[in-house]
């Protein structure tokens, strides 16, 4: 067994199985404590909430609690391995919510027969939580699921693989384009993958100025074009009226490659066909579409990013979901809308241009982090991500009318 594999298994097994636990926030030592916490005292908040449902935020953990919910149909880039096997990833998302944004989070893995069963299950339990983070649910079902749950739930519902990924990709890409001296409106973009992450990334890039007709999207059958008769309604939005059919056809002269598909699908030969000063975001986890060592050995004028923590430029939704939920929950937003998403893009991208503390560099294991080709996006450990992104998101929620309470006084002052 490789050393790293054993380390990863030990990390998950020791000192206790898994990565999260539940802590008490009040004293439960004496009979008096128990009389308050349980019977008879607990009856008082019960009566208060029954009379005024908003009191649930005052007397329970709901307002600081996010559910991470999956059915395990698209676990990272590992495929449909089912709900149980998705549990380490979902516990991992809960760990990240707590570590980076102070949000309590619990993973819920749902075994279901139909898409409607899944929707009904999540809708039935949604009131328990301040927000619902959907994770690793494959396309196209993820689109129907998210839309139905947004309509049925009273708390924000956010499919991280769609929107978290799109926000971080847009932030990193706008910065990468700036470093490479390119303009998003003129950029030729190849997107490998046509699922949850791909569709959302491309839609958000269009909102940031990319031209739909400059985007070539590929699924497992090749280029998505108008003469294909096997496209779902989401892929159809990216059908190009073109004679190009293969990755080689579309990558020739392209400025940007975004990979949200699977491992090792982008070759050095493909990379060598791209325009000068290209940008390659090989974001498939855990194994990218092309390994950074291979890409950087192929050409030295590129900006390279992956979804992993062990290379520079980690384009990963961890830079977004803890903080977008922090901001949304702190103003009790009823939804996470485009204004909030675009505010998050801007906050993440701006932070990458500021000096970085010694502590962050030490945690990242590097001695320099300066805006440029090896640093287009902040490190997850940068504590300013929480204050900047949550604040920008909460303010956008207030501005766009989805906040149900005002911004707390001196909110997220650094
Ligand atoms: N870095 C990050 O933050 C994130 C990275 N990702 C990564 O993106 C990838 C996709 O995730 P997600 O969108 O949730 O999954 P989905 O299952 O929704 O989509 C997967 C897509 O990849 C396509 N695909 C599979 N094989 C190939 C191939 N050989 N050539 C071209 N396309 C192919 C599928 O094609 P078809 O439609 O034909 O089946 C499908 O469109 C995963 O590797 C995941 O780790 C996802 C979210 C965040
Ligand atoms: C990062 C992530 O959410 C994924 O790869 O699915
Ligand atoms: Mg995911």
Image (spheres, rainbow, N blue to C red):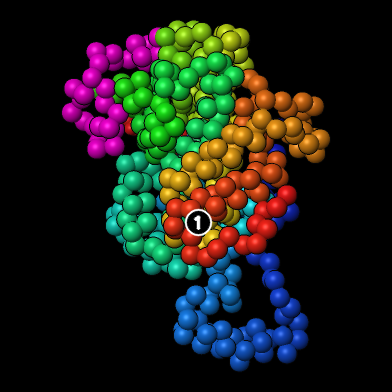
Q: Is residue 190 left or right of residue 367?
A: left
Residue 339 at what x, y percent from top left? Answer: 45, 46
Residue matched to label 1 = 398
The structure residue drawn at horizontal position 35% and vertical position 41%, both measured from the top left corner, is: 139
Q: Is residue 37 left or right of residue 131?
A: right
The structure residue drawn at horizontal position 58% and vertical position 10%, both measured from the top left corner, is: 301
Q: Residue furthest bottom?
A: 40
The structure residue drawn at horizontal position 49% and vertical position 68%, both measured from the top left corner, is: 128
- Viewer-closest of 177 and 105: 177
Q: Which residues are magenta?
A: 226-252
| Disc 1 C-beta below 8 A from ligand 1 | no
The structure residue drawn at horizontal position 51% and vertical position 17%, both measured from the top left corner, is: 182
Residue 101 at what x, y percent from top left? Answer: 64, 52
**From what the image shows, is residue 56 above or below residue 164?**
below
Residue count near mark 1 (Cα–Cα under 10 Å), binned few <14, some 14–19, many ≥20: some
**From what the image shows, is residue 85 above or below residue 7?**
below
Question: In terms of image quadrants, where is residue 242?
Answer: top left
Question: In terms of image quadrants, where is residue 346?
Answer: top right
Residue 311 in view here: no
Label 1: state its secondary structure: helix
- Viewer-closest of 187 and 325: 187
Residue 123 in view here: yes
As for residue 53 lying within the magenta part, the answer is no
Residue 153 at what x, y percent from top left? Answer: 39, 63
As for residue 240 lying within the magenta part, the answer is yes
Q: Is residue 262 left or right of residue 93?
A: left
**From what the image shows, is residue 169 above or below residue 80?**
above
Question: In terms of image quadrants, where is residue 311?
Answer: top right
Q: Main secondary structure of the magenta part?
A: loop
Q: Is residue 253 left or right of residue 226?
A: right
């Amino acid at each position: 067994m490789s050393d790293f594999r054993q380390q990863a298994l030990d990390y998950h097994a020791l000192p206790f199985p898994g990565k999260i636990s539940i802590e008490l926030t009040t004293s439960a030592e004496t009979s008096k404590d128990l009389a308050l916490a349980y019977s008879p005292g607990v009856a008082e908040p019960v009566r208060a909430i029954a009379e005024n449902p908003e009191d649930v935020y005052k007397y329970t953990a709901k307002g600081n609690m996010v559910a991470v919910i999956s059915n395990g149909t698209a676990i990272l880039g590992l495929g449909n391995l089912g709900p149980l096997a998705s549990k380490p990833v979902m516990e991992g998302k809960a760990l990240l919510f707590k570590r980076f944004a102070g949000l309590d989070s619990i993973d819920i893995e749902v075994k279901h027969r139909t898409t409607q069963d899944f929707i009904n299950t999540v809708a039935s339990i949604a009131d328990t939580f301040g927000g619902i983070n959907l994770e690793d649910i494959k396309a196209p079902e993820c689109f129907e699921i998210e839309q139905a749950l947004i309509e049925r739930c009273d708390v924000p519902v956010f499919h991280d693989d769609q929107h978290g990924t799109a926000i971080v990709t847009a932030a990193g890409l706008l910065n990468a384009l700036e470093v490479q001296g390119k303009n998003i409106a003129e950029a030729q973009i190849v997107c490998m993958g046509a699922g949850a992450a791909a569709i959302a990334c491309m839609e958000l890039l269009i909102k940031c100025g990319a031209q739909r007709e400059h985007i070539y999207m590929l699924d497992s059958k090749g280029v998505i074009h108008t003469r294909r008769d096997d496209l779902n309604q989401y892929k159809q939005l990216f059908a190009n009226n073109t004679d190009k059919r293969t990755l080689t056809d579309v990558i020739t002269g392209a400025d940007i490659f975004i990979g949200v598909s699977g491992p090792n699908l982008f070759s050095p030969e493909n990379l060598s066909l791209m325009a000068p000063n290209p940008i390659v975001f090989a974001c498939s986890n855990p194994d990218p579409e092309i390994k950074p060592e291979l890409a950087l050995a192929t050409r030295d004028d590129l900006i390279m990013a992956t979804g992993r923590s062990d290379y520079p430029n980690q384009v990963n939704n961890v830079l977004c979901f803890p903080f977008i939920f922090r901001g949304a929950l702190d103003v009790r937003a009823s939804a996470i809308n485009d204004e909030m998403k675009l505010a998050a893009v801007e906050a993440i991208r701006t932070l990458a241009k500021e000096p970085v503390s010694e502590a962050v560099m030490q945690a990242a294991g590097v001695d320099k982090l300066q805006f440029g080709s090896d640093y287009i996006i902040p490190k997850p450990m940068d504590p300013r991500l929480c204050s900047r992104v949550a604040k920008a998101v909460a303010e956008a929620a207030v501005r766009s009318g989805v906040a149900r309470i005002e911004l707390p006084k001196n909110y997220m002052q650094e």
